[in-house]
Structures are given as structure tokens and as C-alpha cells.
Image (cartoon, rainbow, N blue to C red):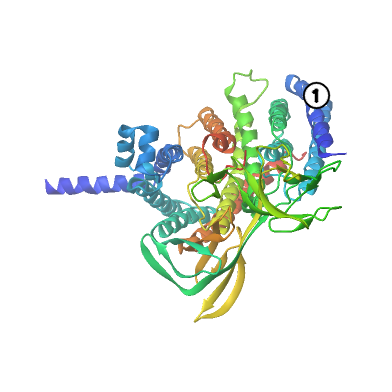
Amino acid sequence: MTEAHFLSAAFVFYLVSLIPHAFVFFKKAAPRMERLARVLVVLGLLAQTVALVIRWKVTGHAPMTNMYESLVFFSWAFVAAYLLADFFLKISRLGFFILVGNLALLMYAFSHDATVKPLMPALQSNWLVLHVVTCFFSYAAFAVSFVASLAYLLPFPKKYFSHEQLDQVIYKSILFGFPLLTLGIASGAVWANEAWGQYWSWDPKETWALVTWMIYALYLHLRLIKGWNEKKLAGVALTGFLFVIFTYVGVNYLLSGLHSYAR
Amino acid sequence: MPLRALKKSVELFRKSGQYIASVRLTVVLLFVLIPVAILGSVIPQGREYSEYAEKFGFKWTGLFYQLHLNTVFLSPWFLILVVLLGANILSCLIVSLMKAKRTFGFILIHLSLILLIAGGLVSATMRLKGDLILNEGQTASSFDHRGKMIPLGFELRLKDFELQHYENELEKLMIAMPGGQKPFEFRFRKNLWTAIPGTDYQFQVERFVPDFRFDMASRAAFSASEEPNNPAILVRMKGKAEDYTEWVFANFSDFHMTSERPIGLKYVWAQKVPKAFISHVEILEKGRVVKELAIEVNHPLRYKGFSVYQASYDSIEGKWSGLAVVKDPGTGIIFASIIMIMLGLTLNIYFHPTRRKKRKFEDEAKEPQ
């Protein structure tokens, strides 16, 4: 079986899991459905893990070197972050929205060229895995916070979500992702110094990653200031993720720089 | 009157001090720095005046130069903002330590940020960087840094430059022999003789030109650019009775054969993907070779405080190599701050004592009575 088979299987598992997730969303207590939804997501994640391992083996390098590979990896990290958040914060009601987002992410990945291409010299480095894994795990945590902030800001009836719980999901996801983003940026700086002799060159990708970091740093500091209520903070978290998307996708297409290969 | 003025100034000083040591100022500075950084990424940085004028018009270009928007991250006002942020973090840290007991992680994070700014300032003022373009066999003992020659303290000689490509499955030369049924297909390498099976002919590709042009005056072929607009190879055919060279063009892909030259050649071009750029260098001291090594992307040479990086190369002939020589005393400070911030964030976020206590308390509360 090939990578495509396992990826398709993962897609189907995630798709089917929408049914129990919808039940969980509409019905307050549905422990069986909750379990079923979780099992399907775990199966999907396992299938996607195998797909990633196969691609790693076929290409001979970590499957994170172009837009297709990074999108598939981002989707994997997003599901892993959701399962982790669900384990600690019990957010199965958000599962439906997270899975819809993840399916959209996978479909976007499938619209990209999946052919295996040789690795350019700059990417032949051990820093690649640390840099990309930490960046995408932080993006995944921020994606969870984004879904929670969206649920906070949309006028859902109170029976669906507790605002206090959503605020905790937003805060803790950001708290989890922030050190990872810091490590992602820092490892990128060390790598750039190793490859080009300059740890920071204000390349658009670097600049936008720093801007994203500043927004989440702002979020963490705004919590300390009186007058910044949960609703405003959810707005900042939501804006933060829009910057994540621009840093990840927008910069590649709109601003040229050292990360131009990431298309 | 002077006493009142003095009191007023003291009060103003106290209030400014309080403001500088406030999280509110951190928030304000972040709100200012975010659009500034975005501006610096949207407006191309460090380009020529003519480029801005062509792209944005003279009016905007003038404004860019006046406000240093063409070099945002080197501008005095950006520097002031960054220094102010450093002062704000430092004073916030001091005040916060005076007010309450803080975790080790908290102190590390904020100290590392101050160190990060300090490292950046050291790099901005003391970093030395120069480019060396060396032909094979050429030696350099100094480099140009902003018009000033900086001695290396040793000699660097480029022994050999090696440009490696991935095996290209698609690029090939097809040869149709007279009377032959099916043309032969060859994956070729430059300057390597290959025998054509069943014949007394052999061939080698002597030259590749990405954008073929022919100068009628000198009657010589040259490449108009590095873009593969008109890729062509010069093939040398050698048989018992004849020995000739012929240009074969990828864009004119039919077999060309005449009554004088009945062997048909067809060139199928495909983009060559570079695998590695390797500069084999020697370090000489007092005319004696003391070290021999290879410089590659991600594998710089470090010697006597200098780092030498593979920066560019001769993409057509593969004869010269572009090396970047760097000496940056700020790098060590930056790396120290990176270690500190990561340690601080890990301790403060993942192993925060109050958060752990809170969790323990919650767990205890959940336990059945």
C-alpha cells in the first residue's frame, strides 16, 4: 500500500467522524458517540502517521520541504493537538469544527503537486526537522485556539459552549504553542546562521513569524491588564491565527524571500 | 516657585519612570512594532533609488527616503523603539522583582529578551562581512567590508569548486544511426566519451548553453542569459572516418540529418537540480598549507574567529565560487539568549509551580469524599 492509500484512509476516517462529532455537538451528553468520534479520529491519525512515514522513507528526507508535504504535516499536527487538548481540557464539542477545518486543510493539500522532488542544498540540514516540527506544532495549537475563539465570538446559545471554558482553551492552547513558536523561530535563526552566516536577515517569512510571535506575546500580556475582557482577548487570539495563516501561506506567494521554495 | 517647578519635575520623572516600567508600555510598543515590521516586509528593503522610483513613483520614493522606509530595520527611529522596548522590559523586570517573588523561568525569559536586543545591537554595529569571489587556484588574504580591507590573518585558496547535480532522469541525448531501427537514448555527462553500441562511433557532450546565441562577428556561440530560453549542447561525434562537432537544440527537437551527416541527433532538455555546491579550500599560513577542507551550504569553515560560507557559484562553467566571510561578536550573545529564553519558557509555562499546585488542588477536589 502506498502513501496515497493511507492518506485517503485518514481522510475517510476524519470525514466519517463528523457524524458522531455532530451528535456530540448537538446533544449535551453523548458518551458513546464521543468515544466513537475519538476512535475514528485516532484511526485517522494513525493512518496519516503511516502515510508520513512512507513518504519519509520514499523521499529519504523529512516530508516537510514543500507546500504539499507541509500541509499534510500541519493537518497531522492539528489533529494531534486537538486530541491532546481534548485529553486535558475536554473539548469534544469543538471537535466537529476542528475536523471540518482539518478536512479543508487536507483538501487544500491535495490541490498541490505531490511529486517527490530532490532536496535543495540549503534544506539538507538536521535543523530542518526541529525547525519545521516546532513551527507546525505551534501553528496547530494556535489553530485550536482559533477554533475556540471563533466559537467564543460567534453567537452560539450558551447551552453549547461555556465562555469560561472556551477562554481557558484559547489561553492554554496559546500557552502551549508559544514556546514552540519561539523554538521554531530560534532554531530557524541558528540554521540560517549555519547556512548563510546571518541569524536574522529580516526576510519576509522571518519578519511575519516575529510579528505572529509579538501578537501572541501581546495576548499573554494583555491578560495582565485590567479592562481587557475575555471577548477582546478572543479577538486578539483570532487575529493571531490570521497572522499565522499569512506567515505560512501568504508570504510564500505574495512576498519573495529566503523561503520561496516553500510553495 | 522654583520648589514647585522642582516638585513638578520630580513628579513628572516619577510618572515617566512608572510608565517605562509598566506592562502598558510593553503593549503600546508591541502595537507600534507590529505595523512597523509589516511595513518593512511589504516595502522592499535596501534597493536602489531607481528601483523604488520605477515601482512607486518619485513622490513615494522621496517619502520612503525621508522616513527611512527603504531601510526600516536600520533606521534611527526603529532603533529607538527597540532600545525603548529593552529599557521597558528591564525596568518591568526590576519593579516586578521588587514587588513580588518571581519564578526563575520568569526572570530568565525577560533577561533573555534584553540580551537578545543587546546581541542584535552588537551585531548591527560590530559585524564584519565580505564577499570573496575566487577562481580555482586563486588565493585571498583579506576581504572588503564597507570599503575597508579586513585582513584574515591567513590565506584562503580555492583548490577546486565542485557542483553536484541530482541524477537527471529526464535529460537525454537521442542518436539515430543511418539504417538503424530505433534511436539510442543516452543519459550523458559533460566531457565523457560514450560508445554507441554496434557502431564504431563514440560521442561526448562538450558544452551546454542555456540561452543559445551566435555572434556572427566572432563566429562563436554564447549564452544570452542563465535562463533556459534556448538550451543547446555541443556534441562531438567521432568515428573511424570522421570527427566533427555539432550544436543540438532542445527547442528544435526533430532529428536533424543531412546527406553529409546522416547521424540524427535529438536533445531532450530537463532542468538540472543542484545537489551540492562544494568549495575545496586550503588554509595557508606563512605559505604553508595548514588545513584542507570543504565548504558547503550548512557546513561553513570556522578558523581564527572567522566563518566562511558557501554563498554563490558559477552556474555555467562551475569555475568560480562565491564565499562569504563573517565575523560577528553578536552571534554568541544571541545564542546564549536563545538558550535562556527556551529554558525560561519551558520552566515558566510547562513546569510553572503555581499551575502545578492548582492542578494538584483540582485533582484532589475531584476525588470522591
For image coordinates 36% across by 40% down, the residue present is B50
Who is closer to the viewer here, B139 or B204? B204
For image coordinates 43% across by 59% down, the residue present is B123
| Residue at mark 1 | A20
For image coordinates 84% across by 27% down, the residue present is A32
Q: Residue furthest left?
A: B1
- The image position of residue A29, as x and y in percent, is 78, 23
Q: Secondary structure at mark 1?
A: helix
Task: Name the quarter where the C terminus of chain B is drawn.
Answer: top right
- The image position of residue B204, as x and y in percent, is 72, 55
Residue B65 in the figure: left or right of residue A169: left
Who is closer to the viewer here, B191 or A247? B191
Q: Quadrant of residue A177?
A: top right
Residue A263 is at least partly visible in this image: yes
- The image position of residue A204, as x and y in percent, is 50, 42
Residue A200 in the figure: left or right of residue B210: left
Q: How many marks?
A: 1
Badge 1: residue crowd in 10 Å (few <14, some 14–19, many ≥20)? many
The three-letter code of the residue at mark 1 reads Pro
- Give me the chain letter of mark 1: A
Q: Quadrant of residue A175?
A: top right
Who is closer to the viewer here, A3 or B220? B220
